[in-house]
Every structure is written in C-alpha cells, then in structure tokens.
Amino acid sequence: MTISEKPHVVIPADHVPGPKQGQWTYGHYAALPNDGQRYETVDGVLYTVPPSPMEWHQRSAGRFIYYLLAHVELAGRGRVYHAPFDVELTSKIVLQPDVLVLLNESCGKITSSHITGAPDLVVEVLSPGTAQYDWQQKYDAYAQAGVREYWIGDPINHTLEVLVLENGEYHSTGIFRGEQVVLSKIVPEFPVQARQFFPE
C-alpha cells in the first residue's frame, strides 16, 4: 500500500508530519490539513480511519441517528450528533463516533467546533475495516474517558450489544437481535427493536 492509497483498515498514520506517535494532542490533530483522509488519536497515537464506509454501514448509522433523534433530541432530553464530529475525550484521545448522545446535563461539553469530554452514549457501527479498532482501542478509550454507555451495532449479523460502564469497566447488558427491544439506561423507555436498526 502506498501513502496515497486510501486504507481499508485503521492503521497508525506514521507518514503524517507532526509529533512522535504517542505525543499527538488535540491541538496537533486540529491543525492537520484537510488532505481527504479521516484521522483519530488514541493515547496520543494518530490513526488513519477508512473515510468511506460501505453503503450498508451508512444505512444502519442513519437508522441509529433517526431513532435516537426521535427519543432524545425531539423528546427534549439532549442532543444527538453523527460523524464526522470530533470528540476530545482527553488531550490525547480524539475520536469521531458514528453516533453520540449528550443528555441535557452534559450539553456544557459542546463547543462550536467539537465536544470536550465524554458523551453519555456512543454508537459504533462495525465494518470489516474498523471492527477490531472499535472493539479494542475505542472500547478502552471510551471506558477510560467515562462514556457511560457504548452500543456496538453489527449490520452483518443484525445484532446490537449494549455495554454499560460500571466501576470503570464495560459490562454487557445483552446482545439484542430481531424483535427484542433494546434496553438502555441512558435512553429509558426506548421502544425500538434491534431489527429496526438494520435494513434488509
């Protein structure tokens, strides 16, 4: 793979001029030129993220946005955002979740350019190029930063796992599929079945 090719998996962006890997901060990240690539930082390491998700990934992500907008933002409980929108979890961790929720009491974390601090809920929709990254680096980063609920949607298997943060670690409250109603502490009384997130 040459530097000019778009990667299909998440890889360290060792070719990008800047500080040594492990020392990237939000300031360095925000100063990156718009080169058509999508970047994130975890523990000060700059990663190149596949910039163009598959069509079915986008359709699923759109459904998460739709249902969360209806039951959070339009219900007056908070705000819903989708990628690309920067979330500065710490000075050395900057991510762009597929979908995120800030409840009203957390809206002070919103700035005109990005969010500073942990959202209440983050959704990542798996794709072959990002699944390992979502389950490892992002999983650890969200737990470390205090994201209270992490949803991992799998459009291939049509499942949604809900992870709730307890004592600094994520614990699964279930893998929802088919007509099972998704149970969430952040969005209580959420009358949505798992299948509704995954178009056929």
Image: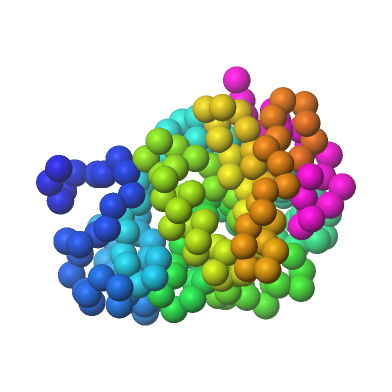
Q: Residue at x 63, y 33 (%)?
A: 159
Q: Residue at x 18, y 70 (%)?
A: 17
Q: Which residue is most to the right?
A: 189
Q: Give the prevailing secondary structure in the magenta stretch.
A: loop
The spot of residue 83 in percent (x, y) is 50, 53
Among the 4 quarters of the image, the one containing residue 24: bottom left
Q: Is residue 60 visible?
A: yes
Q: Is residue 65 visible?
A: no
Number of residue marks: 0
Camera-nearest residue between 10 and 110: 10
- Is the C terminus in the top left, top right, bottom left or bottom right quadrant? top right
The spot of residue 122 in percent (x, y) is 61, 55
Residue 188 in magenta?
yes
Camera-nearest residue between 108 and 90: 90
Q: Is residue 164 above or below residue 67?
A: below
The range drawn in magenta is: 183-200
Camera-nearest residue between 112 and 18: 18
